[in-house]
Amino acid sequence: MTNYDDNNDATCEMMEMAKEDEELIITPSRQPYSSSKSIPTTYSKFIPYYKILILLMVVSATFYLISNERSTNNNDDQSSLVSITNKHSGCFSATFFTKGGNTKKLNYAQLMKYSLLGKNVTKSVRYNHLCPWMKIRYNCAKNETLQYGKSAYDWKLILEQGTNKCNIWDLTHDLGGPVGVAKSILKDVSINNKKIGNNKKEKYIVALFGNSYLRQMLQAFMCGWSNDISYTLMQKNSNYSISIDGLAKRHGEPIRIDEVGDMVRMPMVWEGDVDTCGEILEQNASFYNPGVALPRRCANFDDNIAVVEFGGKIRFYYIFRPQVYEDLSTLMREKLQLEPKDIDSLVFNDGQEKTIIKDTEMLKTFKSTGVWQQRIIWQYQQFRDVQIRDIGRWFGSDNPWITHPPDGHACMPGPPDDEANLLLYLLYSKSIIRSNK
């Protein structure tokens, strides 16, 4: 019969000798294995191999667990994507797209439709007028509960052709918003032929160059997916006015880099939060209907130049009317720490792509990485036209500050959220839009 006490004693003896061995190695005043210290030859050879063997076993087990976890996660992700594809099969119809060379275009003008999907649509509104990143002029808040179908966010953009129908709102929700879409994209071996060392690209970069209509899309991302925000930069204390009147007073003089101000993180200010810059500004009351709660605002922040990142996986850079700046490349590098070669998707509106065409070096970089060939030209007018066709009205901002409602800028929440969802759909499906022709 095995004597477990003897085995334990032997084990303890080996552990003590191993401990003593370590002490001999790290203590300079003592000579390892001196003649005054007799250690059996068997143990002196066995101890190092024993320790190495244990170490190898631990390392092997760790790698096995990590590999198994990754495999499980990959299988779970794959299973989830299959489930989403099955649930939203209409969104992946080949008839939705036209291919030409390496470009895949969404036939959005023929597919777009606004519809009341029912009150059971997945989380039909993600925020309200209190969102601190939303410009106050875009609010359509009412001090009453409107009949279903009377609010901008009741209507959702869908893509439809024959029996194929795509509920983009639910699709992007099931994908996990910007973070989920980015994770799916980043599974590719490379993006636009760019890698980080031998690893996959770690973060997807989208650059938005345009006017205030494109700004609304950025704000829809920030308000709608605020819980996933992992990083922001906002312009603070700029020394110029970007308004039409402000630019007119410059008489064509471009905005210098020293006028831009600082790029800093704007605090996450929501209703009820206590923050040093989260103030309710009574002078904003003229933008709201009587009885509507006023949002907290942070003074001296604006998003004429802005950065927002979601979940460490996707980052959006926005520059309002880039043609007004003296040196766009320097602005991007010094204020945004953004290198043109790192951009994965370009989105323009209001003809702002012409600014890039004039910058030969930047255009050369964009063409070399492939993002120029895959650029997206945003068609804001199309959303308004489709709403008028399908709903009989445009959900433009109609708060008391607007003198002739509805405003050209959409209600928020409302159509800008559909725009954000459509952009995510384009990124996910690796497709683009250019014009309605």
Image (spheres, rainbow, N blue to C red):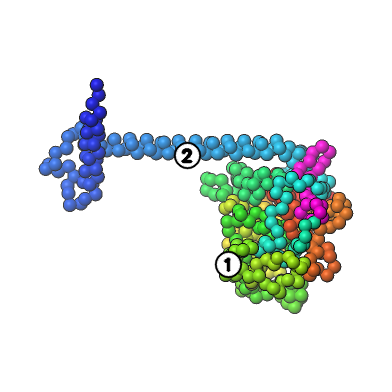
Query: Which residue position holds label 2?
Result: 66
Residue 427 rendering spot, x and y as whole percentages = 69, 48
Q: From this viewpoint, is residue 328 visible? A: no
Q: Going by the image, does 3 lie left or right of 195?
A: left
Q: Which residue is outermost to the top?
A: 1
Quadrant where the N terminus is found in the figure:
top left
Picture quarter containing residue 287? bottom right
Mark 1 residue type: Asp
Which of the 4 image quarters holds residue 305?
A: bottom right
Q: For the view shown, which residue lies furthest in the left direction?
A: 36
Q: Amino acid at mark 2?
A: Ile
Quadrant in the picture for residue 324: bottom right
- The mark found on residue 275 in the picture is 1
Secondary structure beneath dot 2 equals: helix
Q: Is residue 273 above or below residue 177?
A: below
* Label 1: which secondary element: loop
What residue do we see at 52% from left, 39% from top? 70
Q: Residue at x 57, y 70 (%)?
A: 276
- Does 339 sit above or below residue 8? below
Residue closest to the eye, 192 or 29? 29
Over which residues does the magenta segment extend?
Answer: 147-168
